[in-house]
Image: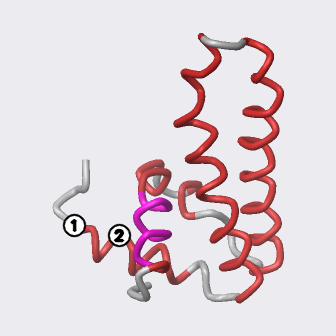
């Protein structure tokens, strides 16, 4: 899946289109919101009424990311390679640890 590239290579390329501080802030908030909405999705088996909250989290997280890219003036990396959909969370962890 990584196409003979290391995670560090993927994260480095991802970082190139996330240089603007507003974009980085939007992604720093949006990525974990999306991830949390996906992690919590099985809770719908407990209470179907939570779908509105989870949908709002998912849509809100993506909205933040697209706002960030509009400010940055660059399209999301996954427009050119779908595998970047799996890089964002790794980038977020690297950023939080001060490595991105």
Q: Where is residue 20 in the image (x, y as percent from the top left)?
A: 70, 88
Local SS, label 1: loop
- The numbered disc on residue 5 is 1
- The numbered disc on residue 10 is 2
Q: Which of the two residues, 72 or 30, is positioned nearer the viewer here?
A: 30
In magenta, the rendered stretch is 87-94
Local SS, label 2: helix
Q: Which of the two residues, 32 or 8, is positioned nearer the viewer here?
A: 32
- Residue 1 versus residue 32 in the image, above or below: above
- Residue 31 versus residue 97 in the image, above or below: above
Residue at image location 45% in from the left, 70% down from the top: 91
- Residue 44 versus residue 64 in the image, above or below: above
* 58 falls in the magenta region: no
Q: Where is residue 65 in the image (x, y as percent from the top left)?
A: 72, 62
- Residue 8 versus residue 50 in the image, above or below: below
Q: Do the residues labelled 2 and 1 touch (CB within 8 Å)?
A: yes
Residue at image location 63% in from the left, 39% down from the top: 37
- Displayed quadrant of residue 63: bottom right
Query: Which of the two discs, 2 and 1, labels the residue nearer the N terminus?
Result: 1
Residue at image location 35% in from the left, 70% down from the top: 10
């Amino acid at each position: 899946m990584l196409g003979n590239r290391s995670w560090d290579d993927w994260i480095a390329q991802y970082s190139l289109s996330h240089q603007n501080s507003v974009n980085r802030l939007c992604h720093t908030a949006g990525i974990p919101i999306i991830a949390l909405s996906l992690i919590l999705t099985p809770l719908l088996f407990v209470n179907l009424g939570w779908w509105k909250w989870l949908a709002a989290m998912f849509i809100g997280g993506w909205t933040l990311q697209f706002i960030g890219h509009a400010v940055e003036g660059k399209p999301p990396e996954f427009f050119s390679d779908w595998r970047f959909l799996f890089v964002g969370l790794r980038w977020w962890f690297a950023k939080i640890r001060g490595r991105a």
